Image (spheres, rainbow, N blue to C red):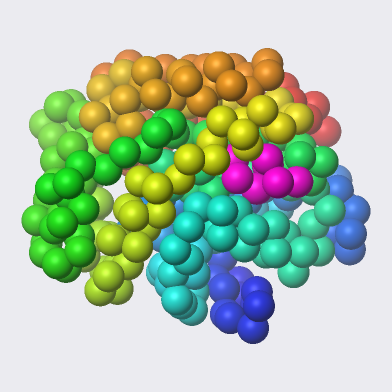
Amino acid sequence: MEFTVAGKRVFAATGGRAFEATGGRAFASGRRALLFVHGAGLDHTVWMLPARYFANHGFSVAALDLPGHGRSEGPALATVEAMGAWLLAAMDELGLARAVLCGHSMGSLTALAAAGAAPARVSALALLATAHPMAVSDDLMNAAAANDRRAYDMIVGWGHSRHAHLGRSTAPGMWMAGGSLRLLERSRPGLLHTDLAAVNAYAGAPAAAAKVACPTLVLLGDSDRMTPSARGRAVADAIAGATTVVLKDCGHMMVAEQPDQVTAVLARHFIGALGDK
């Protein structure tokens, strides 16, 4: 589906079912609103499997393309704080008084910033492959600034576990590393650097985490070299009552590496937080 935020076109995938606006209520026709937010240089397609699952299990789903990503108009936003504010504005445009937020990597910080800025508007929160600080290496930052494709190679190399590089996909014939590489190659020039600079500079995670007032899941990979689990646990420790789950033999690109496991953990969290209605 398409809608506008601040006059700019936004695209969101809905998991194969029409998104039901709430008209200002928390839920529409018994369906709970769930917004997915992707990571740096990526787009809505990373959420294809979980979006379809939840769209068919009681949720109105919107897997968003952030500004400048995928099929959404730019420019890309330069700070995580701006991304969080944009996410709340997107909720306004969709008629959502409240929503469940689920973000991966940069998207996790975006969701966290939104939840910290407007705690009453977030009914449940899931932060995947999150960290504080979310530091970016100089080599990666410099390559991204130069629009050097080595930046994509670094992310693909560091972002997948050893098992993913060996091709252990549960979907026969799927090349996980190659899929991530092609997705990054589709991004617009300069976009990856803008995203990486935003997460590298973000210092607001502790303050936002202290304000979160909803059931929160922090989902980490034990083989994540981009956002190491120790830094993810630091985020969880700052959120009252947060639940931490660590996936075994899983890297940063966890939705690609272990889609069934990720979806199952998310389903348990959201149903436990909201009730099986």
Q: Which residues are magenta?
A: 112-118
Residue at x-position 82% and y-position 41%: 120
- Position of residue 166 measured from the top left corner of the image (x, y, whole percent): 11, 31
Q: Is 180 within the magenta?
A: no
The total of numbered circles placed on residues is: 0
Q: Quadrant of residue 124?
A: top right
Can you say whether 125 is above or below 228 in the image? below
- Depth check: give the residue in front, 93 or 202: 202
Q: Is residue 66 left or right of residue 277?
A: left
Residue at x-position 12% and y-position 48%: 139
Classified by dominant secondary structure, the portion drawn in magenta counts as helix
- Depth check: give the residue in front, 15 or 76: 76
Q: The C terminus appears in which quarter of the rendering? A: top right
- Position of residue 268 measured from the top left corner of the image (x, y, whole percent): 62, 23
Can you say whether 188 is above or below 41 in the image? below
Q: Is 115 within the magenta?
A: yes
Residue at x-position 44% and y-position 69%: 76
Q: Is residue 56 visible?
A: no
> Furthest residue to the bottom?
7
Q: Is residue 128 visible?
A: yes
Q: Is residue 78 left or right of residue 189?
A: right
Q: Is residue 253 left or right of residue 162?
A: right
Q: The N terminus appears in which quarter of the rendering? A: bottom right
Q: Is residue 90 left or right of residue 277?
A: left
- Depth check: give the residue in front, 77 or 276: 77
- Position of residue 14 measured from the top left corner of the image (x, y, whole percent): 60, 60
- Position of residue 87 measured from the top left corner of the image (x, y, whole percent): 63, 58
